[in-house]
Image: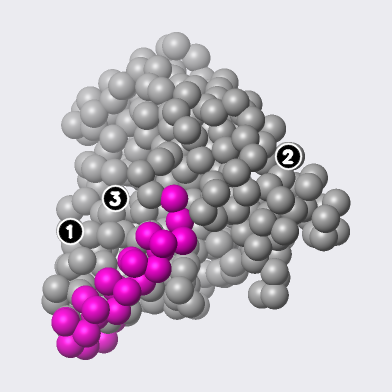
Amino acid sequence: MLMNAHARDKACFGASWNLATVAELEVICATESCETVRDEVLGRHTSMGVGGSTPLMVWPSHPEAVAKVLEWCADRGLAWRTLGGGSNILVSDAGVIEPVINLTNLVDGANFQATTAKLPSGMLTAQALRTTIRSGLAGLVWSTGLPGTIGGAVAGNAGCWGGQMADVVASIDLIDANGKWQTLENKELTWSYRRLQLPATIGPSAVIVSATVNLRPEDSSELTGRSYKLQQLKRADQPVGVRNSGCIFKNPNPNHSAGWLIEQAACKGIGIGKAQVSTLHGNFLINRGGATFADIEKLITRVQTAVQEQSGIALEEEICRW
Ligand SMILES: Cc1cc2nc3c(=O)[nH]c(=O)nc-3n(C[C@H](O)[C@H](O)[C@H](O)COP(=O)(O)OP(=O)(O)OC[C@H]3O[C@@H](n4cnc5c(N)ncnc54)[C@H](O)[C@@H]3O)c2cc1C
């Protein structure tokens, strides 16, 4: 079975974290000039805004620091999790027991050439899009309106408007679970709908530190116009200015979008606690302010049940659960 982004960071490391190992990791991070915060609330780092805490959040600012942290963890059999922009993650109220490696400071080293660009994993996808458009480079216009980072987009093969990361990535640089740097060409990667599977030799646990994408020269004002139109379409169709995680469910097949099925099952606008199915787009669950993970989880189940009863189709989650 193909590994999804969620399974990727559930590394099968046997040992358990405790106060002593967390403190030791803090020291390692300090030697690598990584910022760290203990007991950081993950809801502050996800677009849905719910979720408990991690014992330690680590912000590496260079790939060598990621390698050092991963090698240190591997030597002790300790697992970790990877966070980008948090726009595709739903965190439980209990939080997680592992430290979280937050990649949003990994932003150095972007390099835009005539037909390629190397993008650091912490770079916002929107920023990469803006820069390519300004430079007259086509290839990322489809990502208009996509929140989050390049690393998260690659890890989950993000896509919209007929485009997806799988179609533009030339290669990725990653740090494997043993802290070793590896470069993989696109043909070595297995992509599917919202999934990237790394080769078995690497295994499911790795941190993507950069991606090189293929681009082509095109008139900058043409690209601006196309992107603007997509932005308008997205604004008309999706909730803006409220907390959400994008589409909660995968589209079950090309003929049935999850949003349409949810609308047919009369679920648009229904709510539990402060969680609500968007009245604009059935596949968006919104946090109206103060929703808990439990509210959202119950609402997901209620929608799945209603759709199953109405259409006989089982909706599968697209978001990564922690
Ligand atoms: C309003 C809204 C609209 C959206 N529209 C779309 C859309 O049109 N199409 C679409 O595909 N998605 C969409 N999404 C979902 C989400 O924005 C994308 O999946 C995005 O690419 C996730 O990036 P991120 O940095 O936020 O990843 P995160 O949410 O931080 O992480 C997602 C997963 O990737 C892993 N990960 C993150 N960074 C790395 C890394 N560097 N190395 C290894 N693993 C990593 C995480 O561990 C996690 O499992 C939308 C979300 C919102 C809130």
Amino acid under disc 2:
Thr
Look at the image and tell me in which quarter the C terminus lies.
top right
Q: Is mark 3 in CB contact (under 8 Å) with mark 1?
A: no
Asked which quadrant contains residue 271, the reply is: top right
Q: Which residue is mark 2?
A: 301
Amino acid under disc 3:
Gly
- Numbered badge on residue 122: 3
Q: Main secondary structure of the magenta part?
A: helix
Q: In what element is the residue under mark 2?
A: helix
In the rendered view, tell whether residue 186 sits above or below residue 259. Answer: below
The residue under the point 35% across, 38% down is 102
Question: Does the segment drawn in magenta span residue 226?
Answer: yes
Q: Few, some or many C-alpha atoms within 10 Å of disc 3 (few <14, some 14-19, many ≥20)?
A: many
Q: Residue 266's x, y, as percent?
A: 71, 51
The residue under the point 73% across, 39% down is 301
In the rendered view, tell whether residue 157 sits above or below residue 16. Answer: below
* Region in magenta: 215-239
Q: Residue 4's x, y, as percent?
A: 59, 54
Q: Answer yes or no: disc 3 within 8 Å of ligand 1.
A: yes
In the rendered view, tell whether residue 29 sits above or below residue 173. Answer: above
> Is 9 situated left or right of 230 in this image?
right
Give the foreground label among 3 and 1.
3
Q: Few, some or many C-alpha atoms within 10 Å of disc 2 (few <14, some 14-19, many ≥20)?
A: few
Give the foreground label among 2 and 1.
2
Alpha carbon distance from label 2 to label 1: 43 Å
Q: Answer yes or no: disc 2 within 8 Å of ligand 1.
A: no
Alpha carbon distance from label 3 to label 1: 11 Å
- Numbered badge on residue 109: 1
First in sequence: mark 3 or mark 2? 3
Q: Residue 206's x, y, as percent?
A: 47, 50
